[in-house]
């Protein structure tokens, strides 16, 4: 995997964590619908966060 792709994955994870913080959603209890809405809000660029799922 290229450095640019890894950077994109990390930036997506940071954006998701920032969003949960700004909206007051506990990262340990993000409702699935909220996560899906976040993923769909900005197109394919956010989908790279799926690499961080448990």
Image (tube, rainbow, N blue to C red):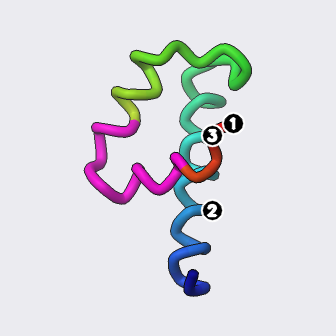
Check disc 2 and report the residue beneath it.
Answer: 10
- Give 22 or 44, whichever is nearer the viewer: 44
Give the residue at mark 1.
Answer: 54
Q: Residue at x 26, y 50 (%)?
A: 43
Q: Give the spatial CA distance, label 1 vs label 3.
A: 4 Å
**Real-space Cα separation, disc 1 to disc 2, in angstroms:** 15 Å
Label 2 crowd (10 A; few <14 / some 14-19 / many >=20)? some
Q: Which residue is mark 3?
A: 53
| First of labels 3, 2 by sequence position | 2
Outermost residue on the right side: it is 28
- Tag in front: 3 or 2: 3
Residue 38 appears at what percent x and percent y? 40, 33
Whether label 1 touches label 3, CB < 8 Å:
yes
Secondary element at tag 3: loop
**Percent position (x, y) of residue 49?**
53, 50
Q: Is residue 12 above or below residue 34?
A: below
Residue 10, percent from left and from top: 63, 62
Q: Is residue 36 magenta?
A: no
The N terminus sits in image quarter = bottom right
The answer to which image quadrant residue 29 occupies is top right
Question: Magenta stretch?
Answer: 39-50
């Amino acid at each position: 995997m290229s450095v640019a792709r890894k950077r994109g994955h990390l930036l997506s994870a940071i954006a998701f964590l920032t969003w949960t913080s700004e909206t007051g959603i506990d990262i340990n209890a993000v409702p699935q619908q909220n996560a899906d809405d976040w993923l769909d809000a900005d197109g394919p660029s956010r989908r790279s966060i799926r690499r961080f799922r448990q």
